């Protein structure tokens, strides 16, 4: 290799490092309220110890030897009651204790289970499964806690067959990968590794397109590990865009849809309540990009925009909370045009009056994905929040219909 070539390679690498070195300096409005500013440099976290908890006097065992939500300790507090201790990865942390464990018993017996949380309040109604696919909420006659309680008490029947007990359906990065692999069998869908997480898990992305790649719809989900309902609605949404219908085909000819369905695989597979393996809420890292997950996402989208001379037409970040909410931007990207989010939410709400979304306007200063779309990409986007307890059949139907409504709006608008 000659000297000029070495210098050229060194210079290109230098340019790359300069353009993507941290912290990132994006034009961002001044934050007047300092509570909006969050330091997103990595913090220490605690992992759960994988183990089997044995109670020979009752012939009962419990374990957490699988990926996903957590069980940090289990003790017997009286002859009929076992207490599960669930700890967050670090704190302060959002009150989303994400528990999951398996239990089995030598004899057929009914016991009481008490869920206790350190630094947390009970949020998720317990669900049971014998195959990790079908989950049934604990029968209300066996559940003895009130909304707002700091712990939860319920009764469960145990026998020789292992039963899984979980806060929400325990959907891990492996299951997401299987979903990606299946979808990408379609000839117009390709999968990509857009980067790696803190623990070096691949961050997988999908591109759904039969277009020239000039108009992008960008979708992400699972920044927050336990937010399963948002993830489920995202999968229904993406499947609808991939359907063999006239509308979906027409949409794919004009728009490329980019999907990163699992932004935080480390948090998901380790049962974190909120953060990534850097101990940070990823949805507060969209200003400085200290964490590899947000950093990789930004780099991927910016490169795509540059390479394809594309614009992002709309962005959607799927989450879950206590109710169905659309957090949209108060400020319009283009003041002459109608807000896409409002038009969209109204069309969904007309079709699902019993399970409608509450539109909530927000500002542009917090360090969330939505505000990054606005401030750097100059694109409108929303945080699409699905209720923790929204019925799963509604989530599936509504996610599919929401995609159809947005496809119609974008085809007409752009
Ligand atoms: Zn969230």
Image (spheres, rainbow, N blue to C red):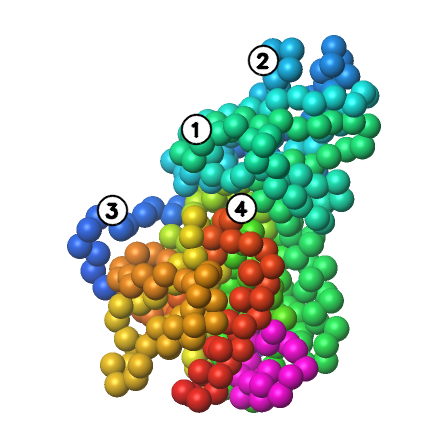
- Give the image location of residue 405, x and y in percent: 49, 78
In the rendered image, which residue does mark 1 sit on? 150
Upstream in sequence: badge 4 or badge 3:
3
In front: mark 3 or mark 2?
2
In the image: residue 320, left or right of residue 326: right
The magenta-colored residue range is: 240-258
8 to 38, vertically: above or below:
below
Upstream in sequence: badge 2 or badge 1:
2
Upstream in sequence: badge 1 or badge 3:
3
- Can I make out residue 236 in this image? yes
- Is residue 251 in the magenta section? yes
Q: How crowded is mark 2: few (under 14 residues within 10 Å), some or many (20 or more)?
A: few
In the rendered image, which residue does mark 4 sit on? 226
Q: How crowded is mark 1: few (under 14 residues within 10 Å), some or many (20 or more)?
A: some
Q: Nearer the viewer, residue 373 or 171?
A: 171
Upstream in sequence: badge 4 or badge 2:
2
Please tell me in which quadrant of the rendered image residue 141 appears. Answer: top right
- Give the image location of residue 233, x and y in percent: 55, 61
In the rendered image, which residue does mark 2 sit on? 77
Q: Residues within 10 Å of mark 3 (few under 14, many from 20)?
A: few
Cα distance between the residues tagged 3 and 2: 41 Å
In front: mark 4 or mark 2?
2
- Can I make out residue 263 in this image? no
In the rendered image, which residue does mark 3 sit on? 35
Cα distance between the residues tagged 4 and 3: 25 Å
Q: Which of 320 and 261 is in front in this view?
A: 320
Q: Which residue is drawn at 58% across and 13% down?
A: 77
368 to 104, vertically: above or below:
below
């Amino acid at each position: 290799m000659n000297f000029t070539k070495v210098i050229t390679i060194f210079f290109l690498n230098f340019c790359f490092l300069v353009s993507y070195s941290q912290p990132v300096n994006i034009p961002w409005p001044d934050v007047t309220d300092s509570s909006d500013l969050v330091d997103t440099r990595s913090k220490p976290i605690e992992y759960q110890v994988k183990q089997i908890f044995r109670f020979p006097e009752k012939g009962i065992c419990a374990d957490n030897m699988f990926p996903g939500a957590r069980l940090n300790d289990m003790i017997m507090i009286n002859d009929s009651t076992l207490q599960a201790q669930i700890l967050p990865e670090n704190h302060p942390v959002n009150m989303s204790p994400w528990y999951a464990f398996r239990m089995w018993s030598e004899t057929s017996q009914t016991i009481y289970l008490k869920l206790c949380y350190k630094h947390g309040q009970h949020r998720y109604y317990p669900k049971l499964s014998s195959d990790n696919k079908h989950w049934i909420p604990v029968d209300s006659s066996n559940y003895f806690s009130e909304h707002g309680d700091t712990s939860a008490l319920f009764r469960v029947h145990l026998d020789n067959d292992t039963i899984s007990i979980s806060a929400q359906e325990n959907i891990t990065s492996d299951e997401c990968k299987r979903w990606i692999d299946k979808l990408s069998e379609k000839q117009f869908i390709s999968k990509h590794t857009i980067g790696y997480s803190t623990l070096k898990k691949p961050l997988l992305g999908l591109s759904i397109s039969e277009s020239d790649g000039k108009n992008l719809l960008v979708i992400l989900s699972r920044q927050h590990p336990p937010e399963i309902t948002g993830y489920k609605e995202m999968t229904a949404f993406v499947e609808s865009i991939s359907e063999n219908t006239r509308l979906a085909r027409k949409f794919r000819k004009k728009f490329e849809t980019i999907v990163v369905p699992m932004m935080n695989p480390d948090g998901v597979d380790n049962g974190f309540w909120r953060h990534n393996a850097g101990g940070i809420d990823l949805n507060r890292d969209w200003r400085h990009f200290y964490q590899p997950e947000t950093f990789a996402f930004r780099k991927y989208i910016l490169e795509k925009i540059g390479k394809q001379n594309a614009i992002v037409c709309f962005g959607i970040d799927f989450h879950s909370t206590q109710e169905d909410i659309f957090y949209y931007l108060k400020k319009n990207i283009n003041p002459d045009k109608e807000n896409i989010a409002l038009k969209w939410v109204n069309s969904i709400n007309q079709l699902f009056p019993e399970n409608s979304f509450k539109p909530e306007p927000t500002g542009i200063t917090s360090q969330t994905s939505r505000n990054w779309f606005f401030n750097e990409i100059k694109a409108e986007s929303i945080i699409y929040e699905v209720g923790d307890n929204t019925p799963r059949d509604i989530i599936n139907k509504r996610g599919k219909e929401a995609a159809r409504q947005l496809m119609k709006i974008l085809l007409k608008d752009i």
